[in-house]
Image (cartoon, rainbow, N blue to C red):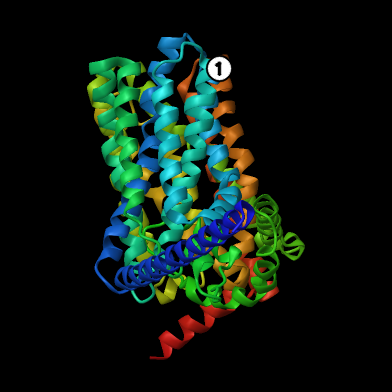
Amino acid sequence: MSNNDEQELDDLQSSDSNTNLNGSLHKAASETFTKDDANTEETIKSVEQGAWRWVIVSSCFFQNLLVDGTLCSFGTLYVYIIDKFEATSLQASYILSLQLCLQALFSPLASAMIINYGVRAVMMVGAGLMALGTLASGFVSDINLLYLTMGALTGIGMSMLSQTAAVTISFYFDKRRGLANGIATTGSGFGFFIFPPLATYLLEAFGLSGACVILAGIMLHGIVFGALVIPNSNDPRSRARAKGQRRLLSIASLVQLTHTQTFLLTITDQSSMYVANMRQYEEFFAAAQDKKCCEKFLHILKEIAKASFDMKLVKDGAFMLYLTGTVMRQLVGYIPGMFIVSRALHFGIRNEETGFLMSTFGVTNIVGRLLLGFLADLPMVKRRRCYLYGIMAISAGVVTSYNFGPLFYHQMLYCGFFGLFYGCTISMKCTVLTDIIGSEKICTGFGMIMFAAGFTVFLGPASAGWIFDKTSSYDVVFAICGSVLIASGLVVMPALCVMAKQKSPGYQKAKDDSLTIDTH
């Protein structure tokens, strides 16, 4: 046998050996993946049916606590930022404006990220961005860099956390979704209560830099809580891995669920809207599967934008009144919280006591949300919820315009009343909007309102800072803020008359429900 023949024989034997080896490896890998898939399906089934769902509720609770606690404690940080950077009120207020603006405007992008990468990944990244922005804020020496760290990074992280915390519950609960949402969103109230005094203590003990480092460490726990969210069969990322089966996610439902964190009791059942909108987006998801990652991402954003605007609603008089009133309320709603601490220090109240002012606001805010959540479903109130919403907004404006006095208990009274009335308006905004446009268009209506509010929440705190720099008067700032709140309530109240004239679907449903209850 020649050398060439021997070489060919060796090559064939080597090829057969490699083929056998590859076949063995392929078989082993197939068995491994099959086993992993079975384990994954068992894990998903246990999560969907077991007690782990309530661990996921605790995760959403903590994320809401982080987001709203951070926003509520900005009034305390605001004073130290001005002192450390020798900034004007206008310059310092830009930070809160950026946080609020990005939290609203980044929501559609966060929705697209949830669809592409799943709830767990977006939640963990959001907590990481919040922690990174806050940590970096402790080491910057220029307020312009603070806009990037505490403003932009933290604001984007807030948007991702608030988005996932609102949406996650709907993936894991059906029968007890209202209870789960109620528990999760109480994290906002606890954030109002815990963070302001905690921030006050940290700032006094460690200064602005040390406080930012410790707060960033607390925010990092959001990554741990995010990791507890085990994907289930309803999670967008898990559906992508299903064997030839894909349950479709309604973007409009996702946009609507983004805002469920703003009230403690879920008044309406989103499951009917989920089913109703499912067919509307079936073709969209089918088309998205054939696209590349970047193209798919942009395609999702385009569809979210399309789902968030309806020209017919622009021609709806009642809806436009409600949109105008809501935008006005959002314009000034965060301004009192920004100035409460600095005004208290101006009155000579001790620094260690100022944190309890915002805690008082947080407690009465919870009471207001719960109280109106109950009252709004009473038969005698159902058809007049627009009036009740307007009265609460006007009441919040009146107490804001009135100077209760310079003493600590005077400021406690103001924070208590303002938290109560403002919390009532927040708890009713979803219900009133449903009365105006009906549940079928609630998703699109919310998208339009939040898009408009995204710009106004940027202008509000910045304008208040500019006014204070020009006047050096807290009374002027609070009087203007209160006047806008009163005007917002007055604008919304006539919507009830327009609804009755237009025979709005939500109004007719509330009327029929109340008549049905009365006959019994």
Along the line of sight, the residue nearer the viewer: 36 or 423: 36
Q: Where is residue 51 in the image (x, y as percent from the top left)?
A: 24, 68
Label 1, on which residue? 144
> Looking at numbered disc 1 in the image, what kind of residue is underneath it?
Asn
To which quarter of the image does residue 499 belong?
Answer: bottom right
| Residue 190 as seen in the image, left or right of residue 131 | left
Most foreground residue, 466 or 3: 3
The residue that appears at 48% across and 82% down in the rendered structure is 513
Q: Is residue 201 above or below residue 255?
A: above
Residue extending furthest top?
A: 86
Image location of residue 386, percent across then percent down: 53, 62
Q: Position of residue 254 (x, y in %)?
A: 54, 61
In this view, the residue farthest toward the front is: 1
Query: In this picture, is 429 found above or below 518?
Result: above
Q: Can residue 402 be seen in this view?
A: no
Residue 304 seen from this side = yes
**Which quadrant, please, contains the C terminus?**
bottom left
Q: Position of residue 473 (x, y in %)?
A: 49, 18
Q: Which residue: 71% across, 63% down?
A: 313
Helix, strand or loop under label 1: helix
